[in-house]
Image (tube, grey):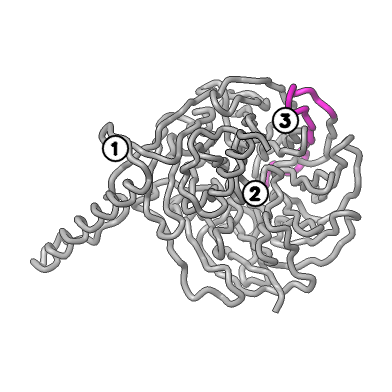
Amino acid sequence: MSLRSLLVSLCVLRVLCGGSFLCGESAAAEPGPWGTYRGTPQRTGNTDNRAGPEKPVVLWAIKSNDHFLAAPVPVKDSILVAGVGAFNRPTVTLFPLTEQPPTKATWAKSAPYLKLASVSSPAVAGEYLVFGDGMHQDSGGVLHCISAATSKPVWQLTLPGELIHLEGGPVVAGNRAYIGGGAAGVICVETDKATLDGKEHDLATVATMQEAKWKELSAKYEELKAKKDDFAIPPDDSQLLKFAPKKVWQKGEVKWHVDAPVNLAGDTLLVPTSFLDKEKVGERALYALNAATGETVWKRELALNPWGGATVAGDLAIVPGSSIGYYLKELKGAKGDVTALDLKTGEVKWKKDVPGGVVGAVAVSDGLAVFTATDGKVRALKTADGERAWLYDCKLPVFAPPAVAGGVVYAADLNGVVHAIDLKTGAPKWTLAAAKDGGAPGMVYGGVTVHGGKVIVATCNLEGPNAGKETVVVCIGTK
């Protein structure tokens, strides 16, 4: 093993063991489990290769008034969900992933610290979570880094401006995080240190300073409360110190519109950019950037918007395309495609048109590229040549990307039904009306997540037949 390979391996090992971004310069480092959207660069929605149950039952269901657009994310032995409440009130909540219904959340984060809703599935990096906020209607967003154990803030990067929002999932690898910011293009920051008042601090020092600030705020509150002061208000995280990460580079401001998750393949960052028909901004393309510098290696124009982002499949980047976004009223007449590009050159290796929008990411496993479409079909194409391996019919439109674990594909449709499909043959294994059985009918927008032999889905009722009604987070397993 070369010295460079050894250093990269040690860096990845540290992240896997809960390290603190102390790997030094590591643009070539691979993201650890759940350090990128859908868990891996192959977008499998699973990292332990443990299939879900053979005979599924709902282990527990948590009803909510929030709408869950992002896929649930495992954090060690817990599950994280990000929701949108009334008046776009943001929520990010961590639940224990147990066999029995959780009696309470480990922690929950909302206003006043979080000011904008998050549809960005967080990246897990050791003891930290990195995620963006803001949706299409927002002008400006924030990239957050918080403690996974306590939810206490570590640092924030504020990005103001029209059509700037951080909707896509970030990638954290080594000591760098990458994320798309809508009209802000794509941003790279250092994660292992932060600045305050012009001074740079490592994350251990940041934690110490935040703890001291919290004690100061708490003491002040207790003092006012003892005096029976009417203005005695308990402190909250929005009053803590505002550390900021160092921005390494930013590319594509105004020219690009990056709402999809970015992906990392070695030294190459894959950046999908879309064209907004209403605003007439952006472009339909996939950019391959040098992860260290942000310089363009190659660009490939696309026929349709790549809302699902790019998937790494060996020496290929596989990109889904859709003529529509996540809008029910646009389902009729939607078109899609899947394109395989050479990772080194951007050359098109194969392309397949689909009679439905492919809005979710493609999952790659065992030489197959598996994806869902708004025509209700789950398709598997051979990554080598794009030829169809099999087709499965959910009989209802699908927005959410599939998960693949232990030789089984899991897809959830817009009626909240989870379908388990054999990866090799496309044969059905089982179906479960997860949303209905969980007590709150609804649609699945974020992908199915498979972790520790359990299948987790969360629903959304922003529109459709159950608009405004309760939603649910459902854990499926074996009794």
Residue 10, above or below 403: above
Q: Residue at 84% of width from left, 45% of height from top?
A: 368
Question: Element at badge 3?
Answer: loop
Residue nearest the viewer, comparing 289 with 180: 289
Q: Amino acid at mark 3?
A: Leu
At which x and y percent is residue 313? 76, 39
Q: Position of residue 111 (x, y in %)?
A: 37, 53
Q: Which residue is mark 1?
A: 196
Q: Quadrant of the C terminus?
A: bottom right
> Disc 1 to disc 2, how far (Cα)?
33 Å
Residue drawn at point x = 54 percent, y = 54 percent: 17
Mark 2 to mark 3: distance in Å?
Answer: 22 Å
Tell me which numbered mark, 2 or 3, is placed earlier along the sequence. 2
* Residue 340 seen from this side: yes
> Which of pointers 3 and 1 lies earlier in the amino acid sequence?
1
For disc 2, the neighbor class at 10 Å (few under 14, some 14 to 19, many from 20) is: many
**270 or 301, nearer to the observer:** 270
**Residue 406: x %, y % from top left:** 78, 59
Question: Which circle marks residue 304 in the picture?
Answer: 3
Q: Is residue 34 left or right of residue 313?
A: left
The circle on residue 38 is 2
Magenta range is: 328-349
Q: Residues within 10 Å of mark 3 (few under 14, many from 20)?
A: many
In the current view of this chain or complex, which residue is farthest to the left?
A: 227
